[in-house]
Image (cartoon, rainbow, N blue to C red):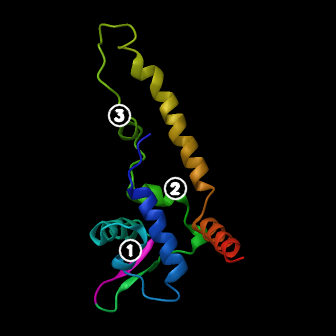
Amino acid sequence: MRVSKRFPLAVHSLLFVAVLSPKRRVTSTLVAESTDSNPVTVRNIFLNLSENGLLIAAAGKNGGVRLAREPKEITLWDIYQAVETNDVEEIFKLHETNSDCPVGKNFYQILHPHMVSAVNAMKVNMEQVTLETLIDELKALLFTSEK
């Protein structure tokens, strides 16, 4: 399955916003430093997240971003859908086949239901994990490393 860097970058960005925005103004430059990526890339991720109701962005000198919903209401699947496709044909790029071949002409029909099942399993799993879950896991790691 192909997943670009956009998904982990979006998760990292939202986690960063959730943890730091109550304490300070979060900008694309700040998140870009944390993710070791380009601020323009982060702004594009912010745009996708905003368009999908996960982030609120304010432009200008006093701008910044904040979560549009509570962390417990944002799942990994929500984030995934905001920045990636869930179209089976886009996730699993199939090669051309020979329609004169008994395997080739039936290949898609045989494989497609299994690909759909894999995407559905990914969705079910990702719907079980919220941004709040990740915040709790981060806090546990931070607490452990301070000892």
Residue 20 % position (x, y): 51, 82
**Amino acid, disc 3:** Lys
Residue 141 % position (x, y): 65, 69
**Amino acid, disc 1:** Glu
Name the disc covering residue 33, or none: 1
Mark nearer the viewer, 3 or 1: 1
| Position of residue 87 in the picture relative to residue 137 (left or right) | left
Secondary structure under the numbered disc 2 in the rendered image:
helix
Marks 3 and 1, how far apart at CA? 33 Å
Instruction: Please identify the quadrant where the N terminus is shown.
Output: top left
Tell me which label, 2 or 1, sits earlier in the chain: 1
Name the disc covering residue 93, or none: 3
Tell me which label, 3 or 1, sits earlier in the chain: 1
Residue 75 % position (x, y): 56, 61
Marks 2 and 3, how far apart at CA? 21 Å
Residue 57 shown in magenta:
yes
**Amino acid, disc 2:** Trp
Q: Which residues are magenta?
A: 54-60
Q: Residue at x 35, y 40 (%)?
A: 90
Instruction: Please identify the quadrant where the C terminus is shown.
Output: bottom right
**Can you identify the residue that label 2 sits on?**
77
Mark nearer the viewer, 2 or 3: 3
